[in-house]
Amino acid sequence: MTTPIVRVPFEERYILPPIEPTEDSTEQIWQKQVRIRELRTARKAVILAHNYQRDEVQEVADFVGDSLGLSQAAARTDADVIVFCGVHFMAETAAILCPEKIVLLPDLRAGCSLAASITPEELRAWKAKFPDAVVVAYINTSADIKAESDYCCTSANAAKVIRAIPEDRPILFLPDKFLAAVVAQQTKRANIIAYPGYCHVHRSIRPEDVTRIMEAHPDIELLLHPECGCVSSCMVRVFDGTLPRDRTLFLSTEGMLRHVQSSPATEFAVGTEVGILHRLRKEHPEKAFYPVNPNAVCAFMKTITLDNVLSSLETLTPQVRVPKEIAHKARRAIDRMLELV
C-alpha cells in the first residue's frame, strides 16, 4: 500500500527556536519558583509539565508526566487555570478536555515537528484512498488532525488502542512511522498503514548511538522510546540476538520510569529526549542513567522557562483555545484514548 505524497518537506514546516541557557543563580531560580507557587495559589491554577521540560520547570510543577498522564491530569483537575509546560498540541488537548478553564501555554513558540508533519488536507486525501480504514492519530497531532481521526493514542497505550479495533479493519496510523513499526510488531497486525512522519529529535537517535553505548556498557539495560530512528534496526537486532532480548525495551517515558522502579538493574541507557534524565536521577539517585544520544534535545520543549511561566500566571496569557466544532470532533478520539488506559 502506498503512503501519501508529502508536498512540503517536514523540515520546512517548522522553525526551531533557539535554546536560551538558564543564567540565573540557584538563589534566583529559587526566588522565581517561590513566586510561581504563590501565583499558582492566587490564580487557583495547576501547573502541568512534560518529562522533557527544563529541570527547574519540572521542579515547580504539580504534575510531571508523559502525554497520556498530562491528558489525564488535565481531565480531572478542579483548578480554574491550567498552565501547560509542554508544547502546543498538549495545551490544545487540555483546552478540548476542559473548555470551561483557562489554558495557558507560556511560550507560543513551543511547537512540535512531529505534529507539523501532517496537515488536515493530507489526512483527508489519505483517508479518501482507504475509505474503510480506521484512523488512529498519535496524540502528537493538532486538534484539526484529531478531529479527522477515529482514535487518539499515546506511545503508552498505542498497542491497546490497536487491539481494540477489529482485526479485519485496515488502520491508518499517523504521523509517526517509527512508533507505527513498533506497534505493528507488538500487535502482530499486518494491516497497519503508516504515515511517513517523525519527530526530528527522536529520529536523531540512530543505530550507531545504540552500538556505541552498548559497547561502553555491555551489561546495561537499553530503554528506547518507540519514536526513535533506531527502533526498526534494534527490533531486528533483538530477534537475531545481537541485542539482548531481556535488556532491550521499547517504552514510553512513563513506561521507562515504571520499569526502572521495578528493575534490579543499576545502569540504564535511555533513548529519548534528555529532559527525562532529571526525573529518573531524582527518583532513583542510587542508579546510573546514560543518554543514548546526549544531543537529543527538543528546542520546542526548552522554550518554556521560569520567566515565561511567571509571566503567564501574572497576565493569564497566552491562552490556548480550540474552536467548538473542532473540539467536539477531536474530543471523540481523545475520549476513546482515555477509555483504553
Image (tube, rainbow, N blue to C red):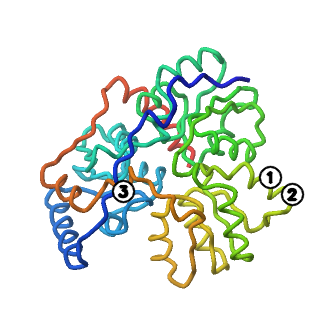
Q: Which residue is mark 2?
A: 240
Residue 314: x %, y % from top left: 13, 55
Q: Secondary structure at mark 3?
A: helix
Pointer 2 with pointer 1, Cβ within 8 A: yes
Left or right: residue 329 compared with residue 106: right
Cα–Cα span, label 3 and label 2: 38 Å
Query: How many numbered marks does the figure carry?
Result: 3
Q: Which residue is mark 1?
A: 236
Residue type at mark 3: give it. Answer: Lys
Residue type at mark 2: give it. Answer: Asp
The quadrant in which the N terminus is found is top right
Cα–Cα span, label 2 and label 1: 6 Å
28 vs 208: above or below: below
Residue 253: x %, y % from top left: 54, 59
Q: Which residue is mark 3?
A: 302
Residue 337: x %, y % from top left: 53, 41
Pointer 3 with pointer 2, Cβ within 8 A: no
